[in-house]
Image (cartoon, coloured by chain):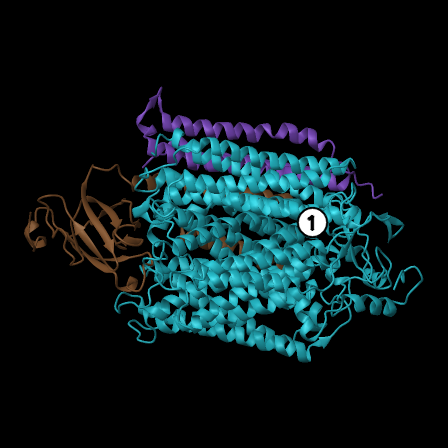
Amino acid sequence: MIAGSAVILSGVLGLIGYAFLNRDGLRDVPDRVWLIGGGVGFPMVVLTALLAWALPTGESMTGARGEVYEVQAEAYQWGWRFSYPDGAPGETGSEAGVLYIPAGEPVDVAVTAVDVIHAFWIPRLAGKIDAIPGQTTHLRIQADEPGEYRGQCAEFCGLGHAGMNFMVVAYAPGDTGAAGEGDER
Amino acid sequence: MSEQGTGRMTPIGLHRALDAIWRAPKGLAAFSTVNHSVVGRRFIVTAFVFFAIGGLMAMLMRAQLARPQNPFLGPEVYNQLFTLHGTVMMFLFAIPLIEGVALYLLPKLLGARDLAYPRLSAFGYWCYLFGGVAILASFVFGVAPDGGWFMYVPLASKAYSPGINADVWLLGVTFVEVSAICAAVEFVVTVLKVRTGGMALHRMPLMAWYLLITAAMMLVGFPPLILGSVLLEIERAFGWPFFAPDAGGAPLLWQHLFWLFGHPEVYIIFLPAAGVVSTLIPVFARTRIVGYAWIVAAIIALAFLSFGLWVHHMFTTGIPHLALAFFSAASTLVAIPTAVQIFAWTATLLKGRLHLSLPMLYLLGFFSVFIFGGLTGVMLAIVPFDWQVHDTHFVVAHLHYVLIGGFVFPMLAAVYYWLPLMTGRLPVFSVSRTAFWLIFIGFNTTFLVMHLTGLLGMPRRVFTYEAGLGWDLPNLISSFGGFVMAAGFAVFTLDLVLQFRFGRRFRRNPWKGTTLDWAMPTPAPSYNFAALPRVSSRDPLIDDPDLGAQLARGEGYLGRVRDGQMETLGVDMATGEPDQIIVLPQNDYLPILTALSLAIFFGCFLFGFYAFSPVGLGLAAVCVWRWLWSMGAKNDGEPEAAGLGLELPLYHSAARPPVWLGLIYFLVANGTFFASLLFGYLFLWTIAPNWPPPRMIEGGIGLAVLTASGLILSAVSAGRARALNASARPGRDLFQALAGIFSVLGGAGLVAILIMAAPPPTGHAYGAATAALLGYGFLHAGVGALFSAYAVARGQAGFISPVRATDARAPALWHAYTAVCALAGLVFVYGLPLAMGGGA
Amino acid sequence: MSGDGRFSGLNLLWLVAGFTVWSSGFVLLYGVHAIGCRAGWPGMELGPLTVQRAVLLAIWAAHLAAGLALFVPLHSAAKRWTGPAGDFLKGASALVTLAALVSTLWIGAPVLFLETCR
């Protein structure tokens, strides 16, 4: 996408630069060629291709709910609480700001907020989803490798917004001991 | 003084006679000035002062972000800074600058002597100034808004922002928006009606088309924001929970209303700048624009499509993907009309013989920066990509490329192009070029690298960040570039001062412009044209380079002074054939007095003296009454000679006087406001949590029927009064009085329903929204009663006749509008509980 | 006087007619989609389609038809537009109306192939 943009930008700027040479080369191209070809036809082709790729991709990133492991995230001013299904590793209700997820499989995060709007974002794992009071939204994430990932609030939420970070610990499948340092219920 | 024009006057004599009645007064009387050139200049200068202040705020933020964990500013100050930076640049710089440029230029481009409503523009200026100063003053006192320029709720609600900060934003911005709505009505009517003879649709300068469509967008774009602000201020002041989720309110409703305004806003800012580009390019390429009709079609398409983008600011709010797809598709689609314009410009450049003058240099800056910003915009329209970079510095970089590239660069080109018209002097070249390169290089240094910062995951609106995340160096580079750009603007300011003092003088038309704005002496005289030209093409100065001198000799329409009146032409919208002589108002203190009355209203609200706020509204009503009263005449009068062998009626005896059109366009804006309110009502009902409400409306259906009948009868009576007047039969004022009485009864009925049948507005969003709907009807019934009272008084005083019919037609239109809205409101209030079975 | 034909300013509305249809289509698609997702229409079958998709397709088709049908009255109105101003209005109205029709086609197309409420 960025390479394509660079080509388009240099193409148009090249044309304008050419105009400053005041050569006659393109003077006789009929107006309609520019207007219909450049103004309508060319962007139509590019945009059709782009949307034909992007819309199905976007859809595949939102799965039907209930198919995969689901954890809850609750945002407040200014921190995160996570809770897990019964028996899963992680500290339910902990305010430690650490989210435990299994690596190598998709995970749905059900996100909500208790006070103002926040947004749940782990830059290296997925896009972001807003945490809205009175409403639950969902985001599918997947950590391919076990390890620690940095997460943060992405929607401005007041004085503590800049420090509203959390940590994601992705544990190897079956390796519940390492992750579940707290009580396992 | 009478009829000085019939005998031959010398150009100097004509100039002196015209200047004597058009000249702006000095001293304290300057507060009464309504002349479009003066008010336009005031707008432009004030906007640039706010721009400088907003820029200084940006520099403070860049200083803070230059290093990780910088102790320079805390979050309290930083949050106020970025909130104000956005608010100032959008509401106090960009929109007012457009208003100022349009105020100053439109009559000159259209071959007119002033706008349709000079006093309205003066009123708009005072609203803008008072609102803007209030917003900035709050920063001095440390209580500036700190919830972001987008003011998302619940963060901006009373519970999480208990201070006065959020109220400053809501009331200050709404005060400023009053001026935007006034300007929009003014520009639409002016472009459609106040042109010179022969300027048919296809001969209007493209800039006029751009401003016409921009103004139409403002009419429809601003009301949702005003509605959102009004509802949020009511929630904060009186506890009506429109947006509080635990009482059935919807935080997302605010976002919808805000972005329903916020996205078109970007195009409202871009279009006039594109108009500048379309105006300057053919001048500097020494040719005519390619694809005039294509450009007009593209602007219209852009205007509509831009209203189908708002949800792309809400891609991460959990809306179903198909709904996002609609907006994603529409967001990519806007690229096409934009591309049509870019290729029309490119083709014009390729056809012409170019030379790189100063305004052209800034246009090259525009091309490179704006196209880049447009391309990242297409990326952001792609949903999966947006999920990643939404609310990061990538978006900050994108929006600055679009706004500075698409707005500031063309506007700087416009300053250099049109400043000689104001000063009569040309710029000092070497300094100007230094300024350009500092701004251009500084800008790209700041914002190019900021795309990377965003891709590296740095979110927006954080006052500091941790070291070691890869963000340190790009932020330092951005801060450095920011200061280079600031230095560039300092040199730019210096350059303007130098131009005023030392610029080279010239006689006429230094750029060889082709439009009427250059068919006048420089500096532009107070009355613009000593006579209004008859035009027969798009580029009158190509047809006749000597046109300016002819006009100065009084050869054209209205090349005279008649009874000390300020005259200009009104024309048929489509063909541009003159159909009336518009007599413009003299200087007047009513605009500033009306604005001061509104300032009392907003001030009382801000400081919580709610009981006193009606005083301000009452004073404003008195001012408006006197304002309207000063127009019109007590006899029909004969058609007057208008020059070039034409005889025309005066405006008050014409079929379509400007004030009638103004009312129609005001009602368009008002109707958008009401439609947004209905949308909000439905939205709460279908989407908000904690519905159905504990109690819905109970009983009162008979009262509702009576109320509706009252308002319908009021509309019928006013219509009858209008018809009786048109056919010169007796009973006009009687029926008008009846309309007023029915209106009062209908308004009382709405209040009775609210008190007796509806649940209290404070308990649940249902009650709040119901009260808002009924309250809207009540307010309009009240204004309608005043309107009828005014019409009766005017009728008794002899201002109304079958020919001078506006005062009889206007109340009829108002009462009909009120009846339709109140009926729709009652249908919603009583119908929805039945249709939805008590909530989804 | 100048050879321009006279026609009322109301004819300017033809410059916005096409996109008014587009706006109606856009708002209805978005609004009805939200209501349908709430009301569980994707779960209800209607022949080979779900009720949700059928309703959305119907809205889309109706607006495409309306956008196309607009050319008939436009054509007859344009006959009254004479002179150079009339020629301009003819060209610009035709362009805008066509652009609006293509835009309606474009924004509704995702209904054909995307899941309706995910």
Please tell me which residue is depicted at 42% across the width and 73% down the height of the picture: B141
Q: How many numbered badges does the structure rendering display? A: 1
Q: Position of residue B832 (x, y in %)?
A: 41, 33
Letter of the chain in brown: A
Q: Position of residue B159 (x, y in %)?
A: 32, 57
Residue at the farthest right position: B7
Q: Position of residue B707 (x, y in %)?
A: 52, 35
The reply to whether residue B280 is in sight is: no
Label 1 SS: helix
Report the front residue among B654 and B313: B654
Estimate how packed mark 1 is, as few (under 14), some (14 to 19) or many (20 or more) residues with alpha carbons within 10 Å: many
Q: Is residue B259 shown left or right of residue B391?
A: right
Q: Position of residue B51 (x, y in %)?
A: 52, 68
Quarter containing the N terminus of chain B: bottom right
- Establish if B390 lies above or below B453: above
Q: Is residue B239 shown left or right of residue A25?
A: left
Q: Colour of chain C?
A: purple
- Establish if C114 lies above or below A137: above
Report the front residue among A140 and B809: B809
Q: Is residue B789 shown left or right of residue A95?
A: right
Report the front residue among B421 and B397: B421
Q: Is residue A96 shown left or right of residue B518?
A: left
Please tell me which residue is depicted at 62% across the width and 50% down the height of the picture: B344
User: What residue does disc 1 label?
Assistant: B659
Letter of the chain in cyan: B
The reply to whether residue B776 is in sight is: yes
Residue at the farthest top position: C47
- Amino acid type, mark 1: Val
Report the front residue among B391 and A28: B391
